Image: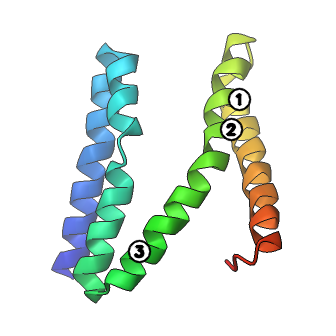
Amino acid sequence: MLRYIVKILVSSVIIVLVSEVSKKSGYIGGLIASLPLTSMLALFWLYNDTNSSSKVAELSTGILLFVLPSLIFFVAMPLLLRRGINFYVALALSSGVMMAGYAFFSLILSKFGVRL
């Protein structure tokens, strides 16, 4: 149970850090958010829980494959906001576009024999 509490606290601190830094500088907040901290934490926690290098390698490969479709979100969100779309609507639309990107990319990967 203590392990889960530590995971939650460490992950929460990073999210709060990004949010607070972003209040002062969106670019520095963006820099921190763009660091693969979440991915590195996930890799760390997975290895710590399983001691399995193969599981960590599989997760790392999965992260790499799905970085590309996730970038669609960061193209759509500022475009929508700069066009005056309400934040929540822009967030929902950007998320929808990203999910469509994930679905499309998953379809492409399946054509190359990558099973999810």
Up-down relation of residue 51 to residue 69 (above or below): below
Q: Which residue corresponds to the image point at 33% horizontal and 77% vertical from the top-left?
A: 46
Distance, label 3 to label 1, CA atoms, is: 30 Å
The quadrant where residue 32 appears: top left
Of the numbered discs in the image, which one, if any, rests on residue 72? 2
Find residue 73 and report its horizontal and vertical position in percent.
Answer: 65, 38
Q: Which residue corresponds to the image point at 32% horizontal and 82% vertical from the top-left?
A: 53
Q: Amino acid at mark 3?
A: Ala
Residue that badge 3 annotates: 57
Q: Amino acid at mark 2?
A: Ile
Q: Foreground residue, 80 or 28? A: 28
Q: Which residue corresponds to the image point at 16% horizontal and 78% vertical from the top-left?
A: 2
What is the residue that sits farthest to the front in this orientation?
Answer: 112
Residue that badge 1 annotates: 76
Find residue 9 and report its horizontal and vertical position in percent.
Answer: 22, 58
Find residue 15 and report its horizontal and vertical position in percent.
Answer: 33, 43
Instruction: Categorize mark 2 by other alpha carbons within 10 Å: few (<14), some (14-19), many (20+).
Output: some
Q: Nearer the viewer, mark 2 or mark 3?
A: 3
